[in-house]
Amino acid sequence: MPLDPFFSERLRVHRRYLIQRNVDAFRARVAGWLGVFGGAGAAEATGTAVQASGKATGARGEAGDGVGGRSPGAAPAASAQVRRAPQQDRARARARHRRAALAWDRTELATVGTPGPDLRIVDHKVPVAGYPAVRVRLYYPDGADAETLPAWLTFFGGAFRQGGIDYPTTDAACRRRAAEAGVVMVAVDYALAPEHRFPTQVEQAHAALMWLHENAPSLGVDRERLGIAGTSAGGCIAAALTLANRERSALPIRLQLLEVPVTDLTGAHIDLAATRALGIPSFLAMRELRSIAGTYLPRKADGRNELASPLRAASHAGLPEAVILTAEYDPLRRDGAEYGARLRAAGVAATVVRYQGVSHDAAIYTGALSAAREWHRQVVGVLARLHEA
């Protein structure tokens, strides 16, 4: 069906962003080539091009790390100043993009989102062997002190390189879902790429799951009624966690809820028909999606690792029942659909629902979009299933 008119202006903004991002990436690459042949005199040009790329703003989860492509490194004879400048500029550009994404998220919640209720929340720091400790936040519904409750470990979206549990729409969603489903939402503030690359995020996720299970009684959580949820990049981490749990710890996970997940970082299941229908050229869409994978993965070959691309696991047998929500105008729609098919082929109950006429981030627009409100109601229904005996 046609794209909901609600998305028209957002689509125009995103198209402009993708075009500008690629123009700036080309400039940065040319400046990098100049750096190879021009020595220290090209450092300023390189920095200027990278800085320009940081000025583009785009849709949530696709804003990138401030550099649209990787420019060649400086030649061995080049000065240390030339070698350092691009890295410093990239870091500054990433910081600018993250600030812009946070400001965008705050505005979206205020204008087209739905604030969450005032709930009791508690933050904890969970140690992770060999990796940075990870912060987790528990959202308790009213009346939680009277009994132990089911809990959902949940992972935010943001292309692996932005977002967090403090983002307003993420926080609001956790509050509303905890309150309406009567469950404890346990939000994991996993580390962002490229500062921390795969498998850091999966190891943090597994540590958080182990911690939640071990400490369930003191946290007011029923360790026999646990679920795992994730959105977009967070959906990839959530699905990977079910595999890691199956192989390492075999803790009882009743359900997995994946919203617009990416499940194959090789890009083999990207559905470019979705982006073409939005008037976005396929090469621009693929370049952006490859940039996301390149930011998260240390090496391209890591995309075949099942903990990076859960769709590519040798077996999906023994995983938790899944509910997977996808969007018609989302190039990740095949990732979700095919993952559900692989689960079913392995004997795992899996339901895949495609919301028509909406895009990748539709779920956050509950204040303005009827499909987003229905999406929220369906999610709450899935979350509440953990109350069943």
Image: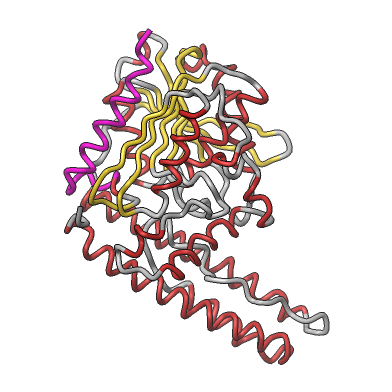
Estimate the x, y position of residue 124 in percent, counting from the top left: 53, 30
The residue segment tinted magenta is 363-389
Residue 122 makes an appearance in the image: no
Can residue 373 be found in the magenta stretch?
A: yes
Estimate the x, y position of residue 70 in percent, counting from the top left: 62, 71
Residue under the point 35% across and 13% down: 387
Is 130 left or right of 70, judged from the image as shown?
Answer: right
Q: Main secondary structure of the magenta part?
A: helix
Is 282 left or right of 294, judged from the image as shown?
Answer: left
Task: Tell me where residue 371 sits by quadrant.
Answer: top left
Is residue 99 depicted above or below 17 in this figure? Answer: above
Can residue 61 be found in the magenta stretch?
A: no
Residue under the point 49% across and 12% down: 224
Estimate the x, y position of residue 292 in percent, counting from the top left: 53, 58
Residue under the point 23% across and 59% down: 7
Farthest-out residue, front: 345
Residue under the point 36% across and 62% down: 275
Is residue 389 depicted above or below 59 in this figure? Answer: above
Is 136 left or right of 378, judged from the image as shown?
Answer: right
